[in-house]
């Protein structure tokens, strides 16, 4: 599933290419035909992201909401546009570019009240300027659930997925099974700052690379080809390979229907212990 940095990067791209001008919107597949007809030819005022949700604003009470889900893709290309191929849920076309949306979990037309309701269900997004880490801290303080669970709860932190969970817990030296309420204020601050740093870097680069300069990617033996989105990482999908810091084999277990990756040697503490180089 695309994580929050991908959706923010997509929103920024669409804002640059389409916002402020009339756009052509269609639904070659037909499943978004009614919504597409409403916004077709209108000015796209702005595009924003909150966590893994994309919002295209076309004016009061007229917002296209997209959630890519597990398989969704929003491919952007230069004009002239080619005939749609496959199941294109929505096509948005401007003067110089067009984008085809395929396989989303959601593509719907919402009014402002419905958008507010969607966002009210979401937690704080570290990539948004209005993010309030204090609210996240309060949720942590009330939760008996382990960090591994709370970090994936979109109602607590929006946009975080499995890759960032594994990597931020490794980089801060925190035990994934530590109850969230046992995390002290200082350690929470370290965790929030590291997560924000990782997400911003991912949005900027368009990929997830989490190694500090002291840890040479060439040490990844064999080279990690297991994930297109995260190829230079400490723990994610490196099961059984030696930790780049201490040499302990990276562990993996099924946890709440997702795979959890961590280093038993580096992540055995209840307080944040950032890697050298922060």
Image: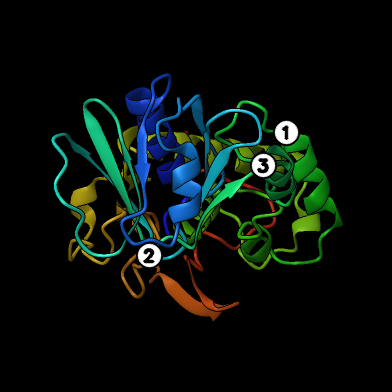
- Which of labels 1 and 2 is toward the front? 2
Name the residue rendered at 81%, 60% in the picture. 143
Q: Residue 187 bears which disc, if any?
A: none
Task: State the separation of the CA atoms marked 1 and 2.
Answer: 30 Å
Q: Secondary structure at mark 1?
A: loop
Task: State the separation of the CA atoms marked 2 and 3.
Answer: 26 Å
Residue carrying label 2: 71
Q: Is residue 236 left or right of residue 94?
A: right
Residue 276 seen in the current view: no
Name the residue rendered at 43%, 35% in the picture. 11
Name the residue rendered at 16%, 41% in the picture. 81
**Camera-side residue of 188 and 259:** 259
Q: Are marks 1 and 2 in contact (CB under 8 Å)?
A: no
Question: Where residue 224 appears, x then y in whole percent?
Answer: 23, 62
The residue sitting at the top extreme is 20
Residue carrying label 1: 132
Question: Where residue 140 appears, x then y in whole percent?
Answer: 78, 52
Q: Secondary structure at mark 2?
A: loop
Question: Where residue 76 appears, x then y in whole percent?
Answer: 26, 41
Residue carrying label 3: 111
Residue 89 seen in the current view: yes
- Which of labels 3 and 1 is toward the front? 3
Name the residue rendered at 47%, 33% in the picture. 278
Q: Residues within 10 Å of mark 2 (few under 14, many from 20)?
A: few
**Camera-side residue of 245 and 114:** 114
């Amino acid at each position: 599933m695309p994580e929050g940095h991908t959706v923010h990067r997509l929103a920024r791209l669409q804002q640059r290419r389409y916002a402020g001008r009339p756009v052509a919107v269609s639904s070659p597949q037909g499943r978004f035909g009614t919504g597409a007809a409403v916004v077709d030819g209108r000015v796209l005022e702005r595009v924003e992201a909150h966590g893994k949700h994309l919002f295209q604003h076309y004016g009061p009470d007229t917002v296209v909401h997209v959630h890519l889900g597990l398989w969704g893709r929003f491919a952007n290309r230069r004009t002239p546009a080619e005939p749609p191929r496959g199941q294109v849920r929505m096509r948005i076309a401007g003067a110089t570019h067009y984008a085809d949306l395929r396989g989303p979990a959601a593509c719907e037309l919402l009014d402002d009240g419905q958008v507010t309701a969607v966002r009210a269900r979401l937690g704080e997004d570290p990539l948004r300027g209005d993010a309030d880490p204090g609210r996240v801290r309060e949720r942590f303080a009330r939760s008996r659930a382990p960090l591994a669970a709370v970090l994936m709860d979109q109602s607590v932190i929006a946009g975080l997925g499995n890759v960032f969970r594994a990597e931020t817990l490794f980089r801060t030296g925190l035990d994934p099974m530590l109850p969230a309420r046992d995390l002290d204020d200082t350690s929470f601050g370290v965790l929030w700052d590291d997560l924000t740093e990782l997400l911003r870097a991912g949005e900027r680069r368009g990929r997830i690379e989490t190694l500090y300069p002291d840890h040479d990617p060439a040490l990844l033996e064999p080279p990690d080809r297991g994930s297109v989105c995260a190829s230079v990482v400490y723990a994610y999908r490196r099961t059984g390979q030696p930790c780049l810091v201490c040499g302990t084999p990276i562990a993996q277990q099924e946890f709440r229907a997702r795979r959890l990756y961590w280093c038993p040697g580096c992540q055995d503490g209840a307080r944040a212990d950032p890697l050298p180089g922060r």
